[in-house]
Image (spheres, rainbow, N blue to C red):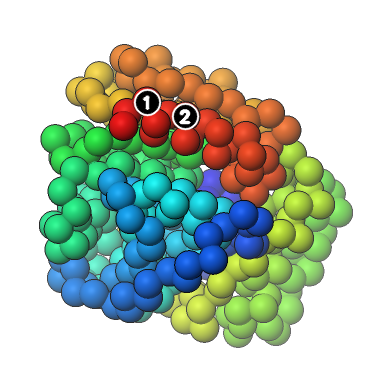
Amino acid sequence: MRGMMHDLRNLSCVLLGILSAATCSGAPSELPIDKGRREINGTELYVKQMGAGDPIVVVHGGPVLEHGYLLPHLAPLADSYELVFYDQRLSGRSAPTVDPSTVRIAAFVDDIESLRVSLELGRIHLMAHSWGGLLAINYALEHGGNLRSLILLDSMPASSEFWQQEEALLAERITAEDGVRRQEIMGTDAFANREPSAIEELLRLSFRPQFHDPERLADLDLYVPDDYSQRSEQFGAIMVDLTSFDLHERLAEVSVPTLILYGADEPAVELGGKALHDSMPGSRLTLIPEAGHFPFVEQPVAFHEAVRGFLSEIR
């Protein structure tokens, strides 16, 4: 997520992923329907569906990891909605290589639209977390007529300026102890060989400042594929789109009901989140107390009350 996107600007660290979270109590006993890889927009994306009702397409954060950290925490929504999870191109269990020219935000947005068409979903609710929020915002600007609503969860900001400011604030939260441990990990043979266990430990350290309660870090169950570093290196091509961008002047074009939700401890609350809310007429800004970047992990009851309340008004 943000920590990973910071490392993206420093490819020598080869760290770009983020995310995955532990099982949430109260999830339906129904198991997800494993659709496996599906040919979408010139690549193969890994797709899972569960539940029935108006479709919610879920866009994970990261990038490079996968949908799994969100699935157990969002699964309770399957009692009223069809949930569609997918791994973005180059991420998780999707195809490990793509045409380098398609590692652009426009292609990631086209993937969402091609997935919607392929699965014959009609108009969708689009729910996105962190890095996925930037993709969802771009989708709303290009394909707003295909949306029922937009739900942004601790979204990446809509400008590179706010992104850099939020990264700087997160860096200030890193403890000296964690900084020393980070350097120790990066000096190991395991990290030099890009072993998943070393990358996972480094990612866990990246998450710590993003929790209200750092002890909840133990609830994160990261999936790091064996070829994580190769996927990350390919993903570096996206920086051509992320070096300088600002979507705020266009955000007034988003006319669908929009929920902007953050854990109250997020630096984005007063930066990118406030700017999103101010730029999107009629949007709703909701803060979850005692939570950071993963409010669905730290405060699941308050999270579901906010999301279900928003969706029920639309229905």
- The residue lying furthest to the right in this view is 177
Point out residue 142 in the picture as x, y percentages from the top left corner: 16, 38
Q: Quadrant of the C terminus?
A: top left
Question: Is 300 displayed left or right of 48 in the figure?
Answer: right
Residue 237: x and y in percent read: 32, 60
Residue 96 located left or right of residue 142 = right
Mark number displayed over residue 313: 1
| Gap in angstroms between the C-alphas marked 1 and 2 | 6 Å
Q: Is residue 205 above or below residue 186?
A: above
Q: Give residue 97's quadrant in the image.
A: bottom left
Q: Nearer the viewer, residue 27 or 22?
A: 27
Amino acid carrying mark 1 in the image: Glu
Which residue corresponds to the image point at 82% horizontal and 59% vertical from the top-left? 180
> Could you tell me which residue is drawn at 53 percent across and 24 percent down?
286
Residue drawn at (19%, 54%) of the image: 121
Residue 35 appearing in the image: yes
Q: Which secondary structure lies at badge 2?
A: helix
Residue occupied by mark 2: 309
Give the residue type at disc 2. Answer: Gly
Instruction: Please report the residue visible at 59 percent of the width from the left and 45 percent of the height from the top.
Output: 296
Residue 10 seen in the figure: no
Mark 1 touches mark 2? (CB < 8 Å): yes
Q: Quadrant of residue 230?
A: bottom left
In-image side of 50 versus 21 (left or right): left
Count neighbours of disc 1 (C-alpha within 10 A) and say few if under 14, some if 14 to 19, many if 20 or more. Answer: few
Q: Position of residue 207 (x, y in %)?
A: 67, 52
From the viewer's perspective, is residue 161 above or below residue 278? below
| Mark linked to residue 66 | none
Crowd class of label 2 (few under 14; some 14 to 19; many from 20; radius 10 Å): few
